[in-house]
Structures are given as structure tokens and as C-alpha cells.
Image (spheres, rainbow, N blue to C red):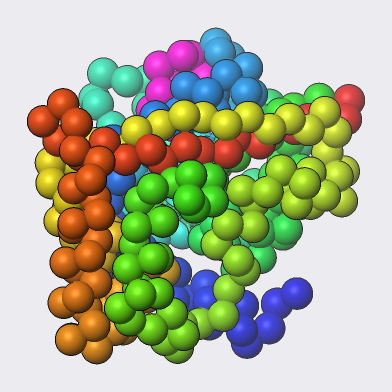
Amino acid sequence: MENKLTNTFRNFEHEGWQKAAGQYDLGFGAVTSQSVDPLLNAVTAGSGVRLLDVACGPGYVAVAAARLGCSVVGIDFSSEMITLAKEMTPRATPGPEFREGDAENLELPDGSFDAVVMNYGMLHLALPDKAIAEAFRVLRPGGRYAFTVWDAPPKTAGFEIVLDAVRLNGNMNVSLPEGPPFFRFSDPFESARSLKAAGFEDIRTAVVPQVWKLKAGIDLFQTMRRAAVRTAALLNMQSPEALAKIEREISERAEEFRAHGGIELPMPAILTSAAKPS
Ligand SMILES: C[S@@+](CC[C@H](N)C(=O)[O-])C[C@H]1O[C@@H](n2cnc3c(N)ncnc32)[C@H](O)[C@@H]1O
């Protein structure tokens, strides 16, 4: 339900993404892009499919879907992300239409899409159940919905290392705006419960194995600080002394994953998909 808390959290996320947009592609693009093909397969994206990419960020999913011949709309509530998506879209692509919009209040007609996807958006929403209901509304009967989120630590080594370093050297209880649990939709039962409640059927979950390649351990710290939102705020609100220890710890632990001349962190995604009944 809308209230002051959800608005505070939404504004915090919005402000965070406006700031992080410039760093996001360099920081996370190479790992979140690994989910694009499984996500598009889950909604059987292909020629002529009307596809909505919600929380599109720089547009990785939208561009790939357009290349498959889908007719694509990409929406994001960050104007900075939408500008980036437009800049990054190759001119030759039969272009997705990118526009500003809120996942929880889609300004789109009922039943107007065959497929709705969201790559790593769910964990940033103040009211994710409202976004699921909106996806259901804009899908045509028989249309498919799919979203990815990070698997929970310790399986996602990047989060395990960062959260552990804060737990050991800093303060996990800094005052952040209250929001839904970050790893809520990493639990297939929780996702199935929410999707069923919205009216979806044929609910499926899969693990997408992914590896986040970084040049050096320190890049994990820098990326989480500059290109994320909630995790960035958790780090940036530590005392200078604690932050220095956290930085050292993250860097050293990430270096334990050195392989093939760089750092290779396991960062699996959980892919959930469902259908609107025909
Ligand atoms: C982790 S990024 C994911 C970007 C992209 N989908 C990808 O594949 O990497 C999360 C995105 O969700 C967007 N976002 C967060 N809350 C939103 C909301 N309520 N409505 C629309 N976009 C939202 C952010 O602006 C950001 O671009």
C-alpha cells in the first residue's frame, strides 16, 4: 500500500539511480547482460512479439529483443538511464522505444503486450507486488512474464563478500530508508506466491549460472560504491575508519577468486517466469 515509507524508499532508489546511471554500464553491464538470453527465451521472444522491458536501465534486454524482431518498449523511472539507453542503442537496430515510466504505475493500455520482462528491477521496487499486478494488466491473455533477481548470498560471491565485510568491520544498521527485503524474490516459493496472487499460472524458476569478471579485487568495492544504490548507501554511510577496513577486506577476499588473469566471481541469477491465463 502507498504510504510515506514507500514514497521515501522510492525517492531514495530514484535519486540513487539518477546518480549511478553513469557508472552502471561499466560496473554491472557485463554481468546483468548474461541474463538477457535466458530472460528472452522464457517469454519466447521473437519476430512480431510486442515486448515491454520494465526497469530497462541502459536497455540491454530491449536492444536484444529488438534484434530478434520484437516490437519493444523500454521503460525506466530514471531519466538518466533512459538517456543512456537511447545513447547506447546502435543506430542500425530497429529501435526500441525508450521512455520514462514507473514499474508500479505503467501508463500503458490493458492487454497491449505479448511479453513483459524485468532484468534486476524487482529488488529495487518499493511495491513489487504492484509491479507484478501491472505486468499482469498490460499482458494479453496467454502472454508471458519473466524477471531476474540475484541469487542470495553465499551463492552470489559479490554480495557475500561485501555484506560479510560490513558485518565484520562496520555497521549493518545504518539508517537507510526501509524497503522490501533485497533477496525476497530469490526465494522461488515467495515469487510463486506473489505471482499466483496476481493471477499468473505456469510459474517456473531456473538458476542462471553467471560469472562476474573484474580486473582486480578493489573493483568489487568501487563498483558496489558507485554503481549500486542500497549496497552503495550501506557502504557510504560507514565511518571513514570502518570504510577503510571494509575496503581492504573486500579487496582481499575478492582476490581469492583470481583466475585467468582477473577476478571471477560466481553471481548466479534466479529467473522466474509465468503466464497470464488464456
Ligand atoms: C539494477 S538496474 C537494472 C538495469 C537493467 N534492466 C539491466 O539489465 O541491467 C535497476 C533499474 O531499475 C530501475 N528502476 C528502479 N525502480 C524503478 C521503478 N519503480 N520503475 C521503473 N524503473 C525502476 C532503475 O532506474 C535501474 O535502471
The question of residue 70 being in magenta is answered with yes
Q: Which residues are magenta?
A: 61-71
Q: Is residue 206 left or right of residue 227?
A: right
Residue 156 vertical placement versus 31 (above, below): below
Residue 145 vertical placement versus 94 (above, below): below
Quarter the C terminus occupies: top right
Whole-percent x, y for residue 247 in the image = 19, 68
Residue 257 vertical placement versus 61 (above, below): below
The question of residue 39 being in magenta is answered with no
Q: Residue at x 62, y 68 (%)?
A: 180
Residue 126 vertical placement versus 34 (above, below): below
Q: Is residue 45 left or right of residue 142?
A: left
Whole-percent x, y for residue 258 in the image = 19, 38
Please tell me which residue lies in front, 133 or 213.
213
Please tell me which residue lies in front, 70 or 222.
222
Whole-percent x, y for residue 73 in the image = 50, 36
Q: Residue at x 48, y 14 (%)?
A: 69
